[in-house]
Image: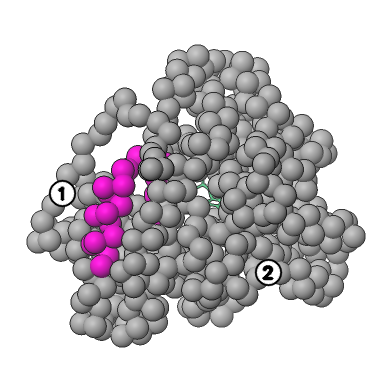
């Protein structure tokens, strides 16, 4: 008999989590203005708000912390991280930042000016936020297949080359400072980009002299999917695949809180010395001196170790199989989720789940609240609230997909927790016919409103 699958690690330290009653949760979510970001973590039983900064570090990462060098300038931890980035990702120049959006802030301060156009694949909200904040425009060139949740396609994060070419031809070259490729594509469901697509975008961009920047938060999960799904890569190591992926990029921004399995941190890595020098000025202004830029020495050390561990096959296999385990359970219960299952999360199709709630009443947010009330599980809306209003018309933007994301922290929960999540969602699914009213906005910020929005029952 074939041995069943088991995690590629054992547990050394645990953290207590507490259940609550439905009555308590009704009170708490009302006090939180129906915004799950406002809940206290003690009010949550299983926290699937994000996989960002919520992972469990390994014994080796904790050991690396102890060896951190806290020198203001020239710390060994900085050089340790610099060498890891060069070896693993191939970039000559790098700047540490305190997280991914800080890397965007610094790099985009150099590259983007008012009126620019940034084509890409479903830009993440902070990426789009930093583009629109500079009065530039993000143009989504993701393939149409990504927007049909039930369609099986191995690389739903791919860029549609025709859409990209049309965009490039429509605007003068100097208006397009770079193309952004998000690996994996968070907003379209943790979906990967194929190596073939990266190569093709490189070729097209090269013909027009446009640089490419990867938004790399989940690059290792992307490499795992390439190994599993793309012909010619099955026998390559994750590290070999990663190296090839980044060989088609001119630079990258990184939120280390995801695939580098640390609780805080980010960086920019580049081939161009010129851009590096320009970015250094902004990094010193916004983040910190060149050799720490928003990170302590110990955190850079843990990050270097995390980059190495996060690109090991056994770790990734454990991680992605857990996400798939949850996905399969939900599919078996008849719940529509983005297929194939994503790298870091399961994305529930809220439009299909709650067809009786009008789209103006925020279907995915309504589903997130219902799941919390049912079981104390906290997911996050990836839908109308996240999409913000159109910066010109100030009308709500209704995105192609209205999703509830169940993001799985790395090395934190067991499959027993996945079972609880699946049954809790099934219980909501069984009474979906009675859910006809959603939520309405009482108060919102002009940009990135989903973090602080205040809601009430519609
Ligand atoms: N890019 C992608 C694809 C992301 O998913 C995120 C963050 C960022 C950039 C920004 O990085 O948080 O370190 O500043 N995503 C988190 C999430 C917040 O929950 O998906 P950050």
Q: Which residue is mark 2?
A: 141
Q: Which residue is mark 1?
A: 19
Task: Report whether the residue tagged 1 is closer than 8 Å to ligand 1.
Answer: no
Q: Is residue 153 above or below residue 238?
A: below
Looking at the picture, tell me which residue is in the foreground, 60 or 114.
60
| Quarter residue 376 falls in | bottom left
Which range is magenta?
406-426
Instruction: Give the mark, 1 or 2, whose residue is nearer the N terminus.
Output: 1
At 30% from the left edge and 52% from the top edge, which residue is drawn? 418
| x, y percent for residue 385 | 43, 69
At 90% from the left edge and 60% from the top edge, which residue is drawn? 207
Q: Quadrant of the N terminus?
A: top left
Asked if one can make out residue 262 in the rendered structure from this viewpoint, the answer is: yes
| x, y percent for residue 279 | 72, 40
| x, y percent for residue 329 | 33, 61
| Quarter residue 285 falls in | top right
Colouring method of the image: one colour
Looking at the picture, tell me which residue is in the foreground, 390 or 352.
352
Mark 1 Cα within 10 Å, few/some/many (few <14, many 20+)?
few
Q: Is residue 139 above or below residue 213?
A: below
Q: CA distance from mark 1 to mark 2?
A: 43 Å
Looking at the picture, tell me which residue is in the foreground, 149 or 445.
149
At 40% from the left edge and 48% from the top edge, which residue is drawn? 322
| x, y percent for residue 416 | 26, 47
């Amino acid at each position: 008999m074939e041995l069943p699958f088991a995690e590629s690690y054992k547990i050394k330290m645990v953290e207590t989590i507490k259940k609550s009653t439905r009555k308590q949760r009704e009170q708490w979510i009302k006090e939180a203005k129906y915004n799950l970001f406002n809940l206290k973590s003690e009010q949550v039983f299983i926290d699937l708000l994000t996989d960002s900064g919520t992972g469990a570090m390994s014994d080796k990462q904790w050991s690396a912390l102890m060896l951190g060098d806290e020198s203001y300038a020239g710390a060994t931890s900085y050089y340790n991280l610099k060498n890891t980035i060069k070896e693993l990702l191939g970039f000559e120049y790098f700047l540490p930042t305190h997280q991914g959006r800080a890397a965007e802030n610094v790099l985009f301060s150099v590259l983007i000016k008012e009126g620019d156009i940034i084509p890409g694949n479903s830009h993440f909200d902070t990426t789009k936020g930093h583009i629109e904040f500079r009065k530039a425009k993000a143009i989504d060139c993701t393939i149409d297949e990504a927007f049909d949740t039930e369609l099986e396609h191995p690389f739903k994060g791919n860029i549609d080359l025709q859409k990209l070419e049309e965009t490039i031809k429509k605007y003068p070259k100097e208006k397009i400072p770079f193309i952004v490729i998000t690996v994996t594509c968070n907003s379209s469901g943790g979906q990967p980009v194929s190596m073939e697509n990266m190569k093709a975008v490189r070729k097209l961009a090269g013909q027009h002299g446009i640089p490419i920047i990867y938004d790399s938060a989940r690059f290792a999960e992307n490499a795992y999917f390439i190994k599993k799904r793309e012909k010619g890569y099955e026998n390559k190591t994750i590290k070999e695949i990663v190296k090839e992926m980044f060989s088609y990029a001119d630079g990258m921004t990184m939120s280390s809180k995801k695939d580098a399995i640390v609780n805080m941190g980010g960086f920019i890595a580049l081939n161009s010395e010129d851009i590096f020098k320009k970015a250094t000025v902004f990094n010193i202004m916004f983040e910190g001196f060149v050799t720490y830029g928003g990170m302590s020495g110990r955190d850079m050390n843990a990050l270097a170790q995390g980059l190495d561990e996060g690109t090991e096959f056994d770790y990734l296999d454990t991680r992605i199989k857990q996400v798939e385990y949850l996905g399969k359970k939900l599919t078996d219960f008849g719940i529509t989720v983005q297929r194939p299952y994503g790298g870091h999360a399961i994305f529930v199709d809220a439009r299909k789940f709650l067809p009786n709630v009008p789209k103006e009443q925020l279907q995915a947010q309504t589903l997130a609240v219902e799941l919390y009330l049912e079981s104390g599980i906290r997911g996050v809306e990836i839908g109308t609230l996240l999409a913000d209003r159109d910066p010109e018309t100030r009308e709500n933007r209704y995105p192609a997909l209205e999703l509830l994301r169940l993001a799985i922290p790395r090395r934190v929960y067991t499959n027993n927790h996945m079972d609880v999540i699946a049954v809790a969602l099934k219980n909501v699914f069984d009474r979906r016919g009675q859910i006809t009213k959603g939520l309405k906005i009482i108060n919102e910020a002009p940009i990135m409103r989903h973090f602080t929005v205040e809601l009430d029952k519609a």
